[in-house]
Amino acid sequence: MDQLISNNLIGLFAPHSEKNIAGILAISKHFILHKKVSRKQCIWTPGVLLPNLYFNGDGILAEYANIYGKLICINFIKPFTLFWSDASFLLWKDTDTTIRALTPGTIYQLEGPRLEKLTIEHGMGYQMANALTTKTILNFRQRSAELCSILGAKDRLKLAFDKDPAILSHISRADLAGYMNLTRSTLFRALKEFYHA
Amino acid sequence: MRNTLLAKLKTQAKTLGPVPDSALNEWIPKLDDAFKGPIYFKRGDILIQQDENSQHLFYLLKGCVIESRIDGDKNMTLSKVHSSGDFIFSLQDFTTGLLSQTIFTCKTAVSLLKLDQKILRQFQKMKGFDILFFIIQQSILGSDRDYTFRLQSMSPADHYRWLKEHSSFITENLTRDQMAAYLGISRATFYRILQKRI
């Protein structure tokens, strides 16, 4: 697992990963088993300060946010990837989302204070925080570009299936409609067209 | 005018978390020296071109700047609308070294402070600057996150109403085409929304 985590971190720190390699390897080694999750089990819920870094083992996770009174699926976390609470880890507020397992899996964790100690020991300063923030900003920009593309529902669906075929087969249609910002009836029509095409 | 930049950094640092005072005390005067200006731009002037290698850091004192992108089919996507108090830079170029994928255009007369890229590169190699850069990134993340959440949770008509109420500089300064791109709808759909409201 260390190797998978360090590969993720190297990607995150690029193009500055080489000079931080000692710190990256140390951070990877300090992740510990957080919990084994069954389907629909929550990893976190809103209102908690969780400045931790997590690694998703072999499961698939979905992140939900209650935005302006609507509970919407905002993100999917693929197997073998790092994840964190944007609100808690990067903005130092309480969590404002829920992360739930779509399939059973294993979650590893590195607690914030431990991570802070390691970054100080290896002279990494705020580089980790900057790398994660940049990655999160770029993810949000990509999502907003997708949501703003004026493609029809069928084309949007095709794009989503091309991008994450394994993940989309595990989510409910209501979640998929929320994620793609479509009404359920529009999504059903698009799915029908998609499968008949 | 310069004081607004310093006040912004201090406030942001205090609101957002446990940033050591020593780092702020050391870096804020350095930034105060390094930011030049105010520099003035006219409506329509371009701050950063698409495919330009620009790593200047701007702090917008007054006015409105849009960040947009034209794809191969000449479709426009509008990724951000900056107003006074925002830091502006090409995130793509700054973090990956790749050329800017977006174009930054002044929608109104603009005044700003500019930190030259040569100085910025020196700063980046110095200890402690990463804390300040983190504070700047936090403010960008907060607004990008809000925009994405609004896109995902509101209908275009509700989003437009929300913008009129909470960010009127956007609805006042964008053309109808730009407004449609910002809401993620076609021009025709946006016109229908406007007609219904009238």
Image: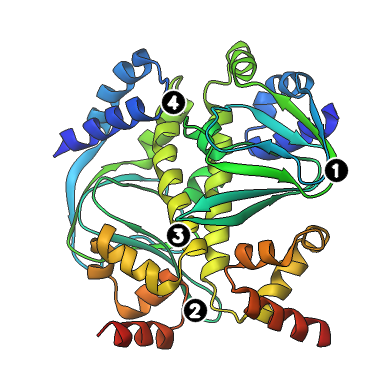
Residue under label 3, please give it: B150
Q: Nearer the viewer, mark 3 or mark 1?
A: 1
Question: What distance separates the C-alpha of mark 4 from that of mark 2?
Answer: 37 Å
Residue under label 2, please give it: B75
The part of the image, by quadrant, that contains residue B197 is bottom left
Residue under label 4, please give it: B131
Q: Nearer the viewer, mark 4 or mark 3?
A: 3
Rate crowding at label 2 as few (under 14), some (14 to 19) or many (20 or more) other CA atoms within 10 Å. Answer: few
- Which three-letter amino acid code belongs to the residue tagged 4? Ile
Residues at discs 3 and 2 both on one chain: yes
Residue B144 against residue A49 in the figure, above or below: below
Q: Nearer the viewer, mark 3 or mark 2?
A: 3
- Which three-letter amino acid code belongs to the residue tagged 2? Asn
Residue under label 1, please give it: A104
Question: What distance separates the C-alpha of mark 1 from that of mark 2?
Answer: 42 Å
Q: How is the image coloured?
A: rainbow
Q: Where residue B172 appears, x then y in whole percent?
A: 22, 69
Q: Are marks 3 and 1 in contact (CB under 8 Å)?
A: no
Label ID, residue B8: none
In the rendered view, does B50 fall on the left or right side of B82? Answer: right
- The disc, 4 or 3, on the residue closer to the chain's N-terminal end is 4
In the rendered view, does A6 fall on the left or right side of B65? Answer: right
